[in-house]
Amino acid sequence: MVHASDSEYPNLRKVRTPLPTGEALTVAVNPANPLEILAVLKDKGIYKTDNGGIDWKQVSDDGSAVTLHFATADPNVVYAGVYGYILRSDDGGDTWTPWQINVG
């Protein structure tokens, strides 16, 4: 179930969404655009809406993703924690690539 608001928290209402049935592991809202939301569904991948949850599209079918985080400095950059590695998106979650961390 997803709750939405046109203003602030006290005015939340239930909304029906075409988001597939499943266990939502995490949800992340773009701090620069609250209508842009990403959700990780257990074993199904990452889904995105640009209109506050009315329409959703699958943007990654990696079913092992468990967490999401929009970068504070640039909300077009999003990280997804996946078992064993990290995915990075530079376009607000539309496309994903494994993120290489250079240590040393």
Image (cartoon, rainbow, N blue to C red):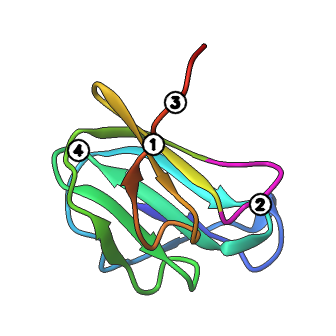
Q: Mark 3: few, some, or many residues within 10 Å (few <14, many ≥20)? A: few
**What residue is rendered at 38% in x and 79% in y?**
56
Judging by the rendered image, the residue that carries numbered circle 4 is: 42
Residue lying at the far front of the rendered structure: 104
Please state the extent of the stretch shown in magenta in the rendering.
70-76
Q: CA distance from mark 4 to mark 1?
A: 21 Å
Specify which label sits upstream in the sequence, 4 or 2: 2
Residue type, mark 1 in image: Trp
Judging by the rendered image, the residue that carries numbered circle 2 is: 31
Judging by the rendered image, the residue that carries numbered circle 3 is: 101
Q: Nearer the viewer, residue 69 or 103?
A: 103
Asked where in the image residue 65 lies, by quadrant, the reply is top left
Of tags 1 and 2, which is closer to the observer? 1
Whole-percent x, y for residue 49 in the image: 48, 77
Label drawn at residue 99: 1
Q: CA distance from mark 4 to mark 2?
A: 24 Å
Q: Is residue 98 above or below residue 20?
A: above
**What residue is rendered at 25% in x and 55% in y?**
45
User: Does the magenta-highlighted stretch encompass residue 75?
Assistant: yes
Q: Secondary structure at mark 3?
A: loop
